[in-house]
Image (cartoon, rainbow, N blue to C red):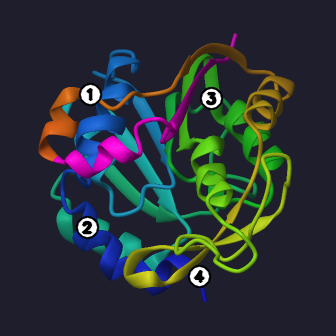
């Protein structure tokens, strides 16, 4: 069974229509500040979850959003929350051949999905194929150092409550992460360079690296994040197809 189907209900409740707190105040503003004008553009939301970013893009004036995910349960939630004919939801796996023609999209956005893929190379090549010339790709992941931060706190006698394994930065291996309602999710540990090199070797040009910093707004609202501010939470990469 698709691992996301198992947690789809909890994920949808947490994300709702606007994303959770950490996305609203840390991740999403960083994406929006680096997202080119979307009005009139055709966009692929690759790994759309419950569709909250697709709805955001439609509100911003995107011409058409193709929102894909492997989880049928998440897509059910997305459709229930969406009342916009410019968003088309469908089941597809971004780790395989995408059901779109070459040069179909002005923008591809993939939010916090790539960590969960075992095969990043196919994804990079497919993103390049379906992106229009001069098109923009923005991918966001949990920062490799964020995963590592948990591992550094571990020792063989007392593993982290977040991850089941102890691992190092260069250990490119599947990890078990306890997520919503402590349900296990499999993620794949990669380095900063792995992500950049995979997409540049696929033919994309790196435009910008973004590492959002905790700001005073979120720290005032949630003082508990003061303990985590020394370790970056997200890594956002912006590419262009020339």
Residue 89 placement (x, y as % from top left): 40, 60
Give the SS element for disc 1. loop
Observer-nearest of 107 and 182: 182
Residue 56: name its quadrant: top left
Q: Nearer the viewer, residue 105 or 51?
A: 51
Q: In what element is the residue under mark 4? A: loop
Q: Residues within 10 Å of mark 2 (few under 14, many from 20)?
A: some
Give left or right: position of 117 versus 47. right
Q: Please give the name of the residue rendered at 38% of the width and 42% of the height, measured from the top-left corner.
A: 65
Nearer the camera: disc 2 or disc 4: 2
At horizontal 77% and vertical 47% (from top left) the residue drawn is 190
Q: Pointer 4: residues within 10 angstroms few (<14), some, or many (20+)?
A: few
In the displayed structure, would residue 83 be above or below residue 231?
below
**Is residue 79 visible in this depiction of the protein?**
no
> Could you tell me which quadrant the C terminus lies in?
top right
Q: Which residues are magenta?
A: 222-242
Q: Which disc is residue 2 wearing?
A: 4
Q: Is residue 188 above or below residue 108?
A: below
Which residue is drawn at the image coordinates 44% and 48% (left, top)?
66
Label placed on residue 14: 2
Quadrant location, the N terminus? bottom right
Q: Which residue is mark 1?
A: 215
Circles 2 and 4: CB distance less than 8 Å?
no
Left or right of residue 170, residue 135 in this image: left
Q: Is residue 69 left or right of residue 172?
A: left
- Per the model, the C-alpha gap separating discs 1 and 4 is 35 Å
Q: Is 166 contained in the magenta span?
A: no
């Amino acid at each position: 069974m698709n691992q996301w189907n198992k947690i789809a209900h909890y994920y949808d409740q947490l994300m709702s229509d606007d994303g959770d707190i950490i996305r609203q105040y840390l991740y999403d503003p960083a994406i929006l500040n680096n997202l080119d004008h979307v009005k009139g553009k055709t966009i692929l939301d690759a790994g759309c979850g419950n569709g909250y970013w697709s709805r955001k893009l439609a509100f911003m004036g995107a011409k058409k959003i193709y929102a894909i995910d492997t989880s049928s349960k998440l897509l059910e939630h997305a459709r229930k929350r969406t009342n916009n004919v410019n968003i088309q939801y469908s089941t597809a796996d971004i780790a395989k051949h995408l059901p779109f023609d070459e040069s179909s999209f002005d923008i591809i956005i993939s939010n916090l999905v790539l960590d969960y893929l075992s095969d990043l190379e196919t994804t990079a090549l497919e993103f390049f194929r379906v992106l229009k010339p001069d098109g923009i790709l923005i991918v966001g992941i949990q920062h490799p150092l964020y995963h590592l931060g948990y591992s550094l706190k571990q020792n063989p006698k007392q593993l982290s409550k977040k991850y089941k394994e102890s691992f190092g930065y260069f250990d490119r291996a599947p990890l078990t992460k306890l997520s919503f309602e402590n349900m296990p999710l499999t993620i794949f540990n990669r380095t900063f360079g792995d992500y950049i090199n995979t997409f540049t070797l696929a033919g994309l040009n790196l435009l910008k690296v973004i590492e959002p910093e905790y700001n005073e707004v979120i720290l005032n609202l949630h003082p508990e994040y003061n303990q985590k501010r020394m370790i970056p939470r997200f890594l956002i990469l912006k590419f262009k197809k020339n």
